[in-house]
Image (cartoon, rainbow, N blue to C red):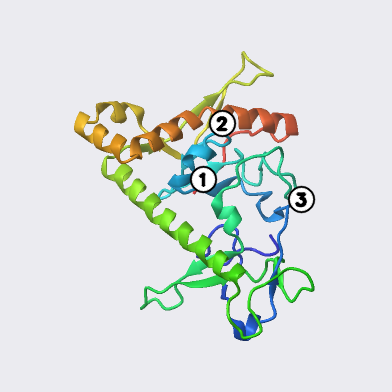
Amino acid sequence: MASAPKSGLPVLYNDLVPLNSQQHGKFKSITVDKAPWIAKQHAIPLTVEEFPLAQRDFPIVFSAGDNPVPLALMGLNEGVNVFFNEDGSPIGNPYVPAYIRRYPFLLARLDQNSENLSLCFDPSSDMLGEFEEGRELFDADAQATQHTKDLLQFCEKFEEAGAKTNAFMEELTKADLLMDGEVSINRLDDPNGKPFIYRGFKMVNQEKLRELRGDQLRTWNQNGLLPLIHAHLFSLDLMRLIFSKQAEQGTAPTQPAASVN
């Protein structure tokens, strides 16, 4: 990233300003096939709606802070992402989380006394500006173009998915299912040596999951929460794949591992 993020801003964002026709009436947005701003990100937020697709490529873990959130783990070290090259081009065809696709836009509450959200963007991004090429954000009458309306709709759907994700996390917390995670990975280059232990994240406690009442499990199965938990648990085996990819790239992790906060 061009500069260090300001405190309190989400991952990837260096600054936020509201999009408006007065200041940005001549702005256009461009589409890029490379995302260098995520090349050094080892964990990206996920919504629960993305679990079925994300579990195919990434371990789905939960952050280690006081308010855990789901994360797609893309590397076992700070600054390592085995799914994107340094220039931000994807390696293979991995699923790209909505959090990445939303950037540089974001819905934010400008007035803390109001529930209204405004479409904002990161001005440090090079995807918006007074370009000759690109898609216009406002028309000649200073009205939002269909492109801008589509961007707003995408961000609104992301907020809705975020609300569902918060509800999912509240259920896990209420059931006291989250525990400090630990995964042991045997090194292929040293099978008889000491295994690598990855920590610094949270995961579902399978013993407590098995002890849940039958009616609780039936309810979770009916409302789709139980399949999400299983997607998370099944995906954890992919940590070994990430470790292997880092070894191939010469970035194999050493203890201690990075925390995903």
Residue ID at (70%, 72%): 28
Which residue lies under the disc numbered 2? 239
Q: Secondary structure at mark 3?
A: loop
Number of dots carrying numbers: 3
Residue ID at (73%, 29%): 248
Q: CA distance from mark 2 to mark 3?
A: 24 Å
Instruction: Give, as a three-letter code, the residue at label 3.
Output: Asp
Sequence order check, earlier mark of 2 and 1: 2
Between tags 3 and 1, which lies in front? 3
Q: Quadrant of residue 27?
A: bottom right
Instruction: Give, as a three-letter code, the residue at label 2.
Output: Met
Which of the pair 103/252 is nearer the observer?
Answer: 103
| Left or right of 112, for residue 42 | right
Residue ID at (61%, 28%): 241
The N terminus: image quadrant: bottom right
Disc marking residue 87: 3
